Image: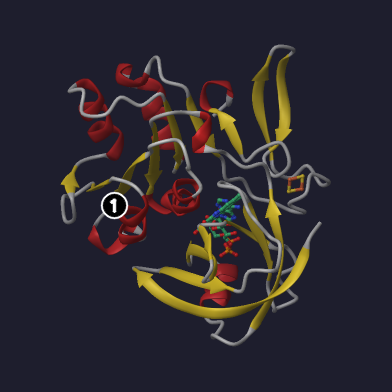
């Protein structure tokens, strides 16, 4: 495991309860899309590290975008620029857009945080991003995505971008022939995965999802993060941290 001390270059609020943290990038670290970082909190009472996808990585540093949902992420949001955090990275297996020609990168809420690096690393593929949020206050990362690939943004209540659930909007655009994805790469809440499986517009398209499970070790040793995956030998409990986090949606037991 690669464990590093990383300096916080900035840590700021970018949406309702949502923050971006830019960290120094260790020499020689070249994360793939959909890999994650496992951050140790300074308050030692919170023993378990917290996992975040590597949202972006460039000459500026390593970016994470996170929602302050509990004690650990609230603590993280209070760290100041100049402080250091200890973190292991890059963890998990990545996902490359370049295995396809016209993949759609679909983000639901904070799931959008996994997409910028995937788009940045696409060299041959021509990805298009679809990002859906509950409302305007939750909209993050859109300018970054727009600088990397064509991007469609929607909110459930229509307060920013197109109105409606992002799965419905993508389905409309597929049906009208506006986009012709040869794969969908998605990260979002479970409801998004269920809608992808239900809507006939996605029937013949391979769908890959980056799963989020509560994690212990982050490196495959503790089995805290297992998920049922259909394999040719039946359902197996695979580790999201070490065997994933990306799986074929149609093989995941939701
Ligand atoms: C591979 C991976 C990548 C992730 N990437 C991001 C990201 O880019 N941005 C982001 O905001 N969040 C991301 N998460 C979720 C993030 O790790 C959790 O929100 C965080 O660990 C919560 O810590 P906490 O101490 O604040 O919350 P806790 O007090 O531990 O819990 C608060 C709430 O968050 C839920 N939660 C806790 N841990 C997880 C988890 N691992 N996955 C899902 N829900 C959880 C709990 O069920 C509870 O509802 C990712 C999770 C994984 C496994
Ligand atoms: S978190 Fe320990 S095996 Fe995945």
Numbered disc 1: secondary structure: loop
Seen in the picture, residue 109 relative to 238 is either above or below; the reply is: below
Which residue is located at x 72 percent, y 32 percent? 238
Image quadrant, ligand 1: bottom right
Badge count: 1
The residue positioned farthest toward the front in the image shown: 124
Percent coordinates x, y for residue 239 in the rendering: 72, 38
Percent coordinates x, y for residue 23 in the rendering: 58, 73
Which quadrant of the rendered structure holds the N terminus? bottom right
Percent coordinates x, y for residue 49 in the rendering: 70, 63
Is 134 on the left or on the right of 114, as rendered? Answer: left
Between residues 64 and 29, which one lies in front from this camera angle?
29
Q: Is mark 1 within 8 Å of ligand 1?
A: no
Between residues 45 and 249, which one lies in front from this camera angle?
249
Is 112 on the left or on the right of 44, as rendered? Answer: left
Which residue is located at x 46 percent, y 51 percent? 120
Seen in the picture, residue 153 relative to 184 is either above or below; the reply is: below
Q: Which residue is mark 1?
A: 134
Is 104 on the left or on the right of 216, as rendered? Answer: left
Quarter of the image holding residue 159? bottom left
Query: Is the image coloured rainbow, by chain, by secondary structure, or in one colour?
Result: secondary structure
Which quadrant of the rendered structure holds the C terminus? top right
Percent coordinates x, y for residue 91 in the rendering: 70, 51
Which residue is located at x 38 percent, y 16 percent? 203
Which residue is located at x 45 percent, y 48 percent? 115
- Mark 1, Cα crowd under 10 Å, few <14 / some 14-19 / many 20+, is some
Is 176 on the left or on the right of 144, as rendered? Answer: left
């Amino acid at each position: 495991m690669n464990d590093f001390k990383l300096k916080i270059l900035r840590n700021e609020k970018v949406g309702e309860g949502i923050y971006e943290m830019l960290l120094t990038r260790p020499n020689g670290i070249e994360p793939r899309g959909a890999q994650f970082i496992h951050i140790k909190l300074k308050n030692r009472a919170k023993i378990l590290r917290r996992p975040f996808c590597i949202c972006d990585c460039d000459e500026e540093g390593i970016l994470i975008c996170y929602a302050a949902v509990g004690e650990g992420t609230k603590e993280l949001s209070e760290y100041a620029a100049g402080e250091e955090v200890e973190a292991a990275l890059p963890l998990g297996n990545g996902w490359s857009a370049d295995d396809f020609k016209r993949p759609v990168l679909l983000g639901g809420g904070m799931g959008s945080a996994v997409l910028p690096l995937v788009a940045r690393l696409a060299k041959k593929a021509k990805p298009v991003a679809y990002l859906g949020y509950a409302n305007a206050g939750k909209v993050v990362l859109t300018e970054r995505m727009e600088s990397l690939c064509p991007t469609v943004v929607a909110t459930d209540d229509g307060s920013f971008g197109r109105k409606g659930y992002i799965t419905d909007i993508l389905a409309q655009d597929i049906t009208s022939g506006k986009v012709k994805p040869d794969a969908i790469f998605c990260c979002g809440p479970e409801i998004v995965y269920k809608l992808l499986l239900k809507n006939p517009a996605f029937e013949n398209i391979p769908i890959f999802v980056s799963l989020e499970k509560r994690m212990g070790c982050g490196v495959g040793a503790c089995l805290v993060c297992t998920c049922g995956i259909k394999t040719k030998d039946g359902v197996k409990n695979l580790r999201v941290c070490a065997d994933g986090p990306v799986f074929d949606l149609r093989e995941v037991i939701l």
